[in-house]
Image (cartoon, rainbow, N blue to C red):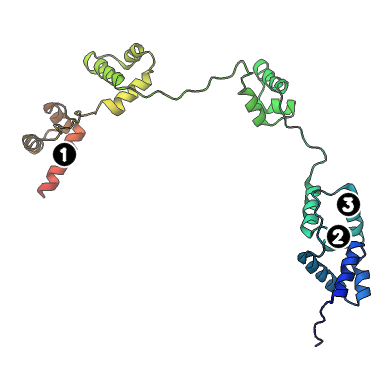
Amino acid sequence: MPSKVYYTKVEDDIILKGRREKRPTKAIAGELGRTCVSVRDRSSRLDLKGALPIVRKPHFSTEDWDKVAAMRAAGETFRAIAHALQVSLGTVLSQRQLMSTKPETKPDRTVTSAGILEMISPRNDQKLKLTQIAIRTGKSIRAVEYALRSPLNPERKPLKTPPRAYTQAEDEEIIRLREQDGLTYAQIATQMQERSTNGVQGRYYRYLQDRGPIRTKDKSWRYTKDEAEQLIRLRKEGHLSFAQIAELFPGRNALSLSSKLSKLMKGRK
């Protein structure tokens, strides 16, 4: 097996000179008595060493693309084309991909005030659908939706404001009007003005109806020993439901009594 023949300084200078003069790789290889593959590989190594800096072009001109087309028609590879144009292989491939996917004319996506009014008027006057307006104006459906939300649209729907939280004074007023005065939810909503019937009803059912006793720092809401014994006696001996027992315990609800009885019976087992 023949030993590897290394490139000398003279051969490197010939390769670099041929590259600068844009000589074909085949001609340089014939002068050195080496193969084209070997010369191209050595040329790439010299590029990595910085012996011949590559001029990277951000975009190819029309002349460059004519050269690329001619060399491709002659059967040259993209690597050979990159060496001839003194650019990297990735540059040639990326520019080729961009040119193959780049449209000839860039679509105009800017929307002016006149364009917004042009999309708003068919919607308000003729009651056209969004797809019909998009086809007529040449815009996307999303662009039409944004135009209808524009302040230029006189019939734009007002933005929904987040609901305001109930205050303690409002909760006390709902409890008083419902439990003491016996008003309906519609009548309560009429008196509160800023609240709806569904809002008042939901507030009372979810948070105020089974509110239980108010828990203070002295923990007076806890069950006493007498209350616990009375609860067990009424449940076992009297066979009363928790709703009936709750009537005998002011400030207690059925859910609280059921939970307390479960804890008491669990401790006795």
Quadrant containing the N terminus is: bottom right
Q: Residues within 10 Å of mark 1 (few under 14, many from 20)?
A: some
Mark 2 or mark 3: which comes first in sequence? 3
Q: Residues within 10 Å of mark 2 (few under 14, many from 20)?
A: many
For the residue labelled by badge 1, is the local secondary structure a helix, a strand or a loop?
helix
For the residue labelled by badge 3, is the local secondary structure a helix, a strand or a loop?
helix
Circle 2/circle 1 CB separation < 8 Å = no
Instruction: Name the one closer to the observer, 11 or 234.
Output: 11
Which label is found at residue 103? none
| Residue at image mark 1 | 260
Mark 1 vs mark 3: in front: 3
Mark 2 or mark 1: which comes first in sequence? 2
Which residue lies at the image location 77% right of the left edge and 35% below the top edge? 107
Q: At label 3, which amino acid type do we have? A: Asp
Q: Where does the image place residue 5, in percent across and percent down from the top left?
A: 82, 81
For marks 1 and 3, give the CA distance.
88 Å
Q: Residues within 10 Å of mark 3 (few under 14, many from 20)?
A: few
| Residue at image mark 2 | 81
| Residue at image mark 3 | 64
Q: At label 2, which amino acid type do we have? A: Ile
